[in-house]
Image: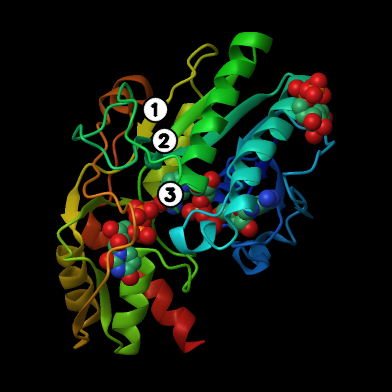
Amino acid sequence: MQRIMITGGAGFLGSHLCDSLLKDGHDVLCIDNFFTGSKVNVSHLLTNPSFELMRHDVTFPLHVEVDQIYNLACPASPVHYQHDPVQTTKTSVHGAINMLGLAKRLKARIFQASTSEVYGDPEIHPQPESYWGRVNPIGPRSCYDEGKRCAETLFFDYHRQHDLDIKVVRIFNTYGPRMHPNDGRVVSNFIVQALKGQDITIYGNGQQTRSFCYVDDMVEGFLRMMGTERGFTGPVNLGNPGEFTMLELAEKVLSLVGSKSKLVFMPLPVDDPKQRQPDITLAKEKLDWTPKVNLEDGLKETVYYFRNLLSA
Ligand code: NAD
Ligand code: UDP
Ligand code: UDP
């Protein structure tokens, strides 16, 4: 049994990670400022004596005693991270410094939720960890992309300079129950629009691609990464290599929901990556991890969640 802290623990991925760690018998300290996360995501855990919820913004120092840290705090959807871009960079950079300072004092293992966005709009396809990426440093996505890149730099410098025990994963698009219905990401947008009979908003011509991983597979990848031997730092790509255009995703959602919503085409956001697919060779080798849930099955679970949410 370990005392494990999760920053951003009331968010989409963080709340599922809380569930898994509690199921494995650990003590969980969930830290969140509820910017994009919600108490509702962890309300079912509040009566569990092994669970503790603390409102805190990671851009400020934090003094607690734990054995392991998962650093997930950061808005993840383009709409939310661009809402207050300065705060987004602060969360990634000051947040990383504070959590790394905490891990250094405690000699605790620390995990960083990095992102496929460190590859920017990639020219290498699929993306291996060795690819340095193609990121615009001054665009509307830069607060997130460069913030996460700088956080990786900090993790590796604390590792080299202070011998910190770090674990860095680069997460590719992940979806599932507890995504925020208004968070603007494509899977939640399409499902909510289909369920409400609203137009499906395709940005650009819909030919851009993403690779979608179901949340349960992702959380399993986190746990396996955290269980690797000291000295194995990553970065490791985690994602499902199944690659789809946004038009294909829209068709799948419409048929699963049984919706007659029309497709409408809207302007492509600035710097929207054209293609994205993880090369997961390293995760397969080092973590013996490969995603199990295909897009159709994962979407069914997610549609079921949103159907209940919207009818409640
Ligand atoms: P999310 O928005 O649901 O979760 C982020 C959580 O962090 C929220 O609960 C939010 O309230 C909290 N938070 C934000 N700023 C904070 C701050 N300053 N202090 C404390 N808490 C703060 O998003 P998610 O999809 O669960 O993403 C979790 C992590 O995984 C993020 O770091 C994100 O960058 C990363 N990630 C997610 C995806 C994905 O597809 N879901 C892809 C790549 C990376
Ligand atoms: N920090 C923290 N909790 C701790 C220890 C440190 O929040 O338990 C913060 C601290 O406020 C500092 C940051 O982590 O701003 C980096 O700490 P570190 O010891 O690496 O650097 P220094 O304090 O020397 O700047
Ligand atoms: N997208 C879309 N319609 C929407 C929301 C998003 O066509 O309502 C597109 C978006 O332009 C991008 C892809 O879907 O090409 C994935 O967007 P998301 O915001 O989910 O994630 P990210 O761009 O960070 O991968």
Query: What's under tag 1, amino acid-wise?
Result: Val
Residue 233 left/right relative to 301: right
Which quarter shows the N terminus?
A: top right
Dot 3 alpha-carbon crowd within 10 angstroms: few under 14, some 14 to 19, many 20 or more: few
Spatial CA distance of label 1 from label 3 is: 26 Å
Q: Which mark is residue 47?
A: none
Labels 2 and 1 touching (C-beta < 8 A): yes
Residue at which label 1 appears = 236
Which quadrant of the structure image shows residue 268?
bottom left
Residue at which label 2 appears = 170
Secondary structure under badge 3?
loop
Q: Name the quarter showing ligand 3.
A: bottom left
Please say whether residue 12 is visible from this viewpoint. Answer: no
Instruction: Tell which circle, 1 or 3, labels the residue nearer the N-terminal end.
Output: 3
Query: What's under tag 2, amino acid-wise?
Result: Arg
Query: What's under tag 3, amino acid-wise?
Result: Gly
Which quadrant of the structure image shows residue 65?
top right
Instruction: Tell which circle, 3 or 2, labels the residue nearer the N-terminal end.
Output: 3
Please say whether residue 247 is visible from this viewpoint. Answer: yes
Spatial CA distance of label 3 from label 2 is: 21 Å
Residue at which label 3 appears = 139
Spatial CA distance of label 2 from label 1 is: 6 Å
